[in-house]
Structures are given as structure tokens and as C-alpha cells.
Image (cartoon, helix red, strand yellow):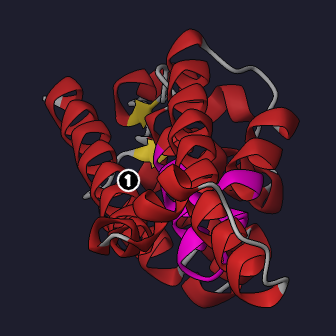
């Protein structure tokens, strides 16, 4: 008897259970589009989707994996998790402190971190910490000089009163946004090139 591919087995099992593609997607916690592509065989099956679908359809995971190893993609270098870190760091657009806290919490709670993931997490934390330091100095000066009416030494006042000092918040947002987008694209390209 010829062994069935994972997509054929999933489709037949879904029909035997009397589920529509939408019902399977909802119960498995994946998108309808993912189920459709898996059943057509036009998409590699991620480990998460495979596990979720196998549980709903009550198909042993080994039965799907063993004859179809070449269809299953395993994210060995955690590029998906790294991309999620960079996307999470964009929360700095809402509040600069969130750009540091959200990725830090994600990194702290993530299990099975590899060296590449840790390296990118450190880069994100360092760039946001340095940016927050400069942004904090700008805000601190405004609070000290304007709100409390405390005069600073003349050399500090000259620095803080220059037009360049006013560029700190603008540069903060531009540099952090550029850093995040550049690294996100680099990770995405690395994943695409490793898939080919």
C-alpha cells in the first residue's frame, strides 16, 4: 500500500471527522488559509501547525512526520522568534520604555534560547538602553531647567541649549526604527536564503 502524504492524510482525516476546513482551523488555532494550503500541498507544514492539527484529528504525530520528513520545516535557528523580538521592540513607538521591556520579558520567558537568539536579544536591549539614556537626559534637562528652575553649570547649559540637543528625540526614533527594520529584514533574508 502506497503511503499517503501528510496533506492527503490530514484532508482524509478531517473529512472522516466531518469537519470543515474552517472548523479544523478554529479548533487547531491556525488560520483557514494555512489549512487550505496544507491540504493542497502548497505549503511546508510548521511543527506548531502539525502538532495542533494532529491533536484535533487524533492522528499520531509520528504517522505524519515519518513518511513526510521533507515536508516539515523546523526552525533550527529560531528566526521566527528573533523576528518576533524585533517586532515587539517596535512598541517603543507607543512608549520608549516598552521598546526595552517587551523584548526583555519575551527573552526572559523564552525557553530553549540558542546563541543567535540571545545575541539579537542583547542587541535590542543595548540599543534601547542607550537610546533611553540619551532621551532621558533630554527629558531630565527639561524637567530640571524648566520645571524646577534650577540653573546648570554654563558648559552644560551651552550643550543643552544648542539646536543639536533638540535633535536627540528625533534621532532616537529614527535610529531605533532604522535599526529594527534593518535587522528584521536581515533575519528574514537569512531565513529565506537558508530555505533555498
Q: Nearer the viewer, residue 119 or 179?
A: 179
Q: Is residue 178 visible?
A: yes
**174 sits to left or right of 19:** left
Q: Is residue 7 above or below residue 125?
A: below
Residue 170 position, x and y percent, is 35, 74
Give the answer, above or below, for where 92 lies relative to 107. below
The quarter of the image holding the C terminus is top left
Q: As drawn, is 108 to the left or to the right of 98?
A: right
For disc 1, the marked residue is 180
Per the image, label 1 sits on a secondary structure element best described as helix
Q: Position of residue 188 (x, y in %)?
A: 27, 44
Q: Residue placed at 38% from the left, 30% from the top?
A: 2
> Residue 189 is drawn in which quadrant?
top left
Residue 17 in view here: no
At a point 55% along the width and 77% down the height, the residue shown is 31
**Location of residue 5 (image quadrant):** top left
Q: Position of residue 142 (x, y in %)?
A: 65, 79
Residue 90 in magenta? Answer: yes
Position of the N terminus, as image quadrant, is top left
Residue 31 lies in magenta, yes or no?
no
Magenta segment's dominant SS is helix
Q: Is residue 42 left or right of residue 9?
A: left
Sort mark 1 into few (<14), some (14-19) or many (20+) by Cα contacts within 10 Å: many
In this view of the protein, which residue sits in the foreground, 160 or 184? 160
Q: How many marks?
A: 1
- Which residue, as the protein is rendered here, is positioned at the far top? 115
Q: Residue at x 71, y 67 (%)?
A: 140
Where's residue 67, x and y in %? 47, 23
Q: Foreground residue, 165 or 45?
A: 165
1 vs 182: above or below: above
Stretch in magenta: 83-101
Q: Residue at x 30, y 57 (%)?
A: 181
Amino acid at each position: 500500500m502506497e503511503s499517503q502524504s501528510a496533506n492527503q492524510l490530514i484532508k482524509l482525516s478531517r473529512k472522516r471527522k466531518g469537519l470543515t476546513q474552517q472548523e479544523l482551523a478554529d479548533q487547531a488555532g491556525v488560520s483557514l488559509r494555512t489549512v487550505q494550503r496544507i491540504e493542497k500541498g502548497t505549503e511546508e507544514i510548521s511543527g506548531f501547525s502539525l502538532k495542533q492539527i494532529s491533536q484535533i484529528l487524533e492522528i499520531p504525530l509520528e504517522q505524519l512526520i515519518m513518511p513526510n520528513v521533507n515536508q516539515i520545516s523546523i526552525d533550527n535557528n529560531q528566526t521566527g522568534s528573533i523576528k518576533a523580538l524585533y517586532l515587539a521592540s517596535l512598541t517603543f513607538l507607543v512608549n520608549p520604555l516598552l521598546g526595552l521591556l517587551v523584548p526583555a520579558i519575551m527573552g526572559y520567558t523564552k525557553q530553549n534560547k540558542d546563541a543567535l537568539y540571545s545575541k539579537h536579544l542583547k542587541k535590542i536591549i543595548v540599543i534601547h538602553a542607550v537610546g533611553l539614556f540619551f532621551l532621558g537626559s533630554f527629558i531630565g534637562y527639561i524637567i530640571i531647567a524648566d520645571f524646577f528652575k534650577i540653573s546648570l553649570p554654563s558648559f552644560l547649559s551651552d550643550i543643552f541649549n544648542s539646536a543639536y540637543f533638540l535633535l536627540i528625540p528625533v534621532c532616537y526614533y529614527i535610529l531605533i526604527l532604522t535599526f529594527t527594520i534593518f535587522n528584521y529584514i536581515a533575519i528574514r533574508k537569512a531565513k529565506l536564503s537558508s530555505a533555498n
